[in-house]
Amino acid sequence: MNKEETILKRLFLACAGLMLALPALVPAQGYPTKPIRLIVPLAASGGMDTTARGISQPLSARLKQSVVVDNRPGAGGAIGAELVARAEPDGYTLLMASASFVVHPLLYRTHYDTLKDFVPITQASRQPYVLIVHPSVPVTSVRELVAYAKANPGKLNYASAGNGSLIHLTTELFKVATGIDIVHVPYKGMGATYTDMLAGRIQTAFPSIISALPHIKTGKLRALGVTSRTRAPALPDTPTVQEAGVAGFEVTQWYGVLAPAKTPAVLVNRLQKEIAQVLQLPEVGQRMASEGSEPVGSTPAEFAAHIKSEVGKWGGVIRKAGIRAD
């Protein structure tokens, strides 16, 4: 090959590389140029909806374009997730997801693949649960609860927000980790459990801190441990379940933002940067703290690793506990 042919070949390769880069560069020009839809796959007024709306307003201001929260409830969040999985990967249709986004496909048939049909943008927040007991149970610590449950197998009932809910799986993980036998009583949401819990018909549960806190403060329910790695600001005197002797036990409910697979990395990175900046705003952090959660703002790679880890963890719990779909 002569010198002239070598130069032509190099020019050709350079042009080919530029052409391959164009699809990633073009969408970023002036993005966004129209409103962005943030799909919330659950009904309005819940924790996910509140988080999405708390982020959307300041994000709209940063992007100088509306970020519209669009509630698409149904099928345990699968309807909204499927809508986003089928959407154009152009950065204008996003999904607000929770840990249920990982759990639901492990139990039910869905028309999307959790790991293949989405690209993670950022984990927005995390929120631990709190292990509570009714005061009629003669225990004041996690260790005492485990000892009492082992001495009285099958005599304690625990509540969950339904079969396959994260609270159900959290308690089953606790059972696997401690070797205790307590009985599952599923409800249609944790709000419905408190009448029976306060009456002592349900002895224990892992509800969210924000829902249990009023009853803990009045002494109607007793907090034994929080499920996060570190103590929760809302319950600074309550140890973590790990501190209390259950090694490696950590569970957090989380909310995060994803886009359809094949969304250009330049848009994913732009959205991550802007959402992370929103999560650092004092008013956003204060609102999340009042709800018992804390902002995260992880990178796409960190969030992807977290989702993959969650799939492995909850898949293992489902198999060991023999949990099946309703």
Image (cartoon, grey):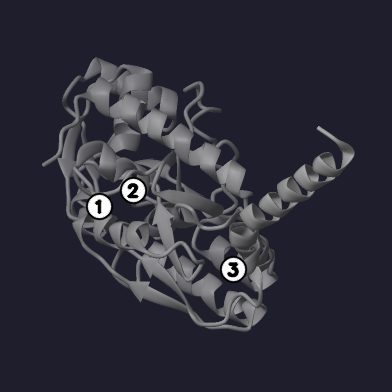
Q: Which amino acid type is marked by label 1?
A: Leu
Real-space CA distance between mark 2 and mark 1, rounded to the nearest whole angstrom: 27 Å
Among numbered discs 3 and 2, the one appearing first in the sequence: 3
Q: In the rendered view, does 77 fall on the left or right side of 305? A: left
Which residue is label 1 attached to?
A: 198
Q: Which amino acid type is marked by label 3?
A: Pro
Task: Assign a secondary structure to mark 3.
Answer: helix
Which residue is label 3 attached to?
A: 27
Please tell me which residue lies in front, 292 or 144.
292
Task: Assign a secondary structure to mark 1.
Answer: helix
> What's the residue at 63%, 77% (across, down)?
63
Q: Choose mark 2 or mark 1, whichever is in front.
A: 2
Q: Which amino acid type is marked by label 2?
A: Ser
Q: Quadrant of residue 62?
A: bottom right
Disc 2: CA contacts within 10 A as few (<14), some (14-19) or many (>=20): some
Q: In the rendered view, does 319 fall on the left or right side of 102? A: left
Disc 3: CA contacts within 10 A as few (<14), some (14-19) or many (>=20): some
Q: Quadrant of the C terminus?
A: top left
From this viewpoint, is residue 145 visible? yes
Q: Quadrant of the N terminus?
A: top right
Which residue is label 2 attached to?
A: 100
Residue 67 location (% of width, % of height): 50, 78
Q: Which residue occupies the extreme left position in the image?
A: 326
Please tell me which residue lies in front, 184 or 164.
164
Task: Assign a secondary structure to mark 2.
Answer: helix
Residue 133 location (% of width, % of height): 33, 40
Among numbered discs 3 and 1, the one appearing first in the sequence: 3
**Mark 2 touches mark 1? (CB < 8 Å):** no
> What's the residue at 45%, 64% (across, down)?
94
